[in-house]
Amino acid sequence: MNKISGTIVNHNSTFEGEIEFDKSIKNIRNTRKVNNQNYIIPGFVDLHCHGGNGFDTMEGANSIVNMSKYHLMHGTTSIMPTTWTNNFEETFEALEGFNKIKEDNLNLLGIHLEGPFINPDKLGAQPNLTQEPSLEFVKKLSDIADIKIITIAPEIQGMNNFIKDLSDLKIKIQFGHTLADFNCCDNIMNKYEIGFTHLYNAMSGNKHREPGVLSAALSKGKFAEIICDKIHVSEQSIKIAKKCISGLYAITDSINASGLKDGEYTFAKNKIKKENNSIKIVDSGTLAGSIITMDKTFKNLIEMNFSIQEAVELTSYNASRYIDNLNIGEIKIGFLSNFLVLDKKFNLIDVYLQGNKVNE
């Protein structure tokens, strides 16, 4: 039986303790305080990640494995590789074999489809390959990959029946890349649990005479993802969202250029440029995802004066609740031994995935 001790931090508690564990946590006991003990926190959960270290979800199974390993080294013990808008054939080719690699790569949760059922007038960095709602598209992909989340634009024609079908399939539905108005969102939210994709970004806003998707999220949303790289969303707006949405959780929205040197690359069929910790489409200057990792996200939250417990809530607990995963997101007896060791300055020291230290 393995043991580790330190200052254990969950979303709702902080105490000095010792963890006994193998694949799962067997026992936790309180210990006396020791000066300069490291923090032990739940492994990060990232439900929206396109890539990293030169790899992209849309390049296929081998690339998914490599990008997930890159993010694992930055503390992401549970990750949801995310697609971008493309035709069925290329999306199928990218996800073929996913269920097989999921068996061997313990940090893979499932797939987040970001598009193609989004508004062509709110693409952001997505290519203009949007499609009308197609249940057949989703079902065929579900045969080869565990689809957990789909980002859609609710104002698109035919979406009401499509949302019902997705709900019947137990797929989480998120509004994103959308110009819907408040009433459109409200009508759907009265019937279904709806999440929100990269809150504030690529959605209609909170105008006082024209309330949009952001208005619906802040007034009625239970869960929403948000990018905390200090570029996509201001510190003040993140704090407003935290007050309004109990299940707010951080994502990276990281792309293939994360971990690479500054320069020009290609993402989602666009030429992009990485410079000064941001990434933009060369032609338009539009932000193209992020290059952040979850360990940097955690430190950003601390720098914004969120408490350690709140940072844990935003980087692990709320995301695990959202996807109904009952064995990650907390350091708790019976849960998987997915946890991280941080020093007192919140630098990542060790990463444990199902009881194995993976960063040696």
Image (cartoon, grey):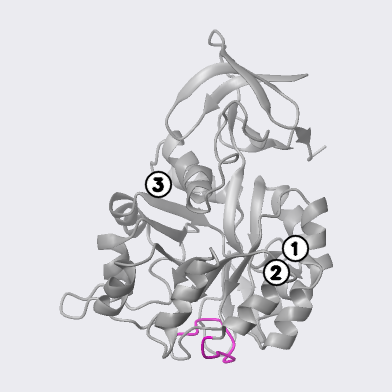
Name which residue lies at 44% across and 74% down.
Answer: 164
Name the residue that disc number 2 marks. 256
Name the residue that disc number 1 marks. 53
The numbered mark, 1 or 2, whose residue comes first in the sequence reads 1
Relative to 85, residue 101 above or below: above
Nearer to us in this view, 294 or 143 = 143
Spatial CA span between label 1 and label 3: 27 Å
Callout 2: SS: loop
Q: Position of residue 308 (x, y in %)?
A: 46, 35
At label 3, which amino acid type do we have?
Met
At label 1, which amino acid type do we have?
Asn
**Circles 3 and 2: CB atoms closer than 8 Å:** no
Callout 1: SS: loop
- Toward the front, the furthest residue is 168
**Circles 1 and 2: CB atoms closer than 8 Å:** yes
The numbered mark, 1 or 3, whose residue comes first in the sequence reads 1
Range drawn in magenta: 122-133
Nearer to us in this view, 301 or 161 = 161
Classify residue 54 by image quadrant.
bottom right
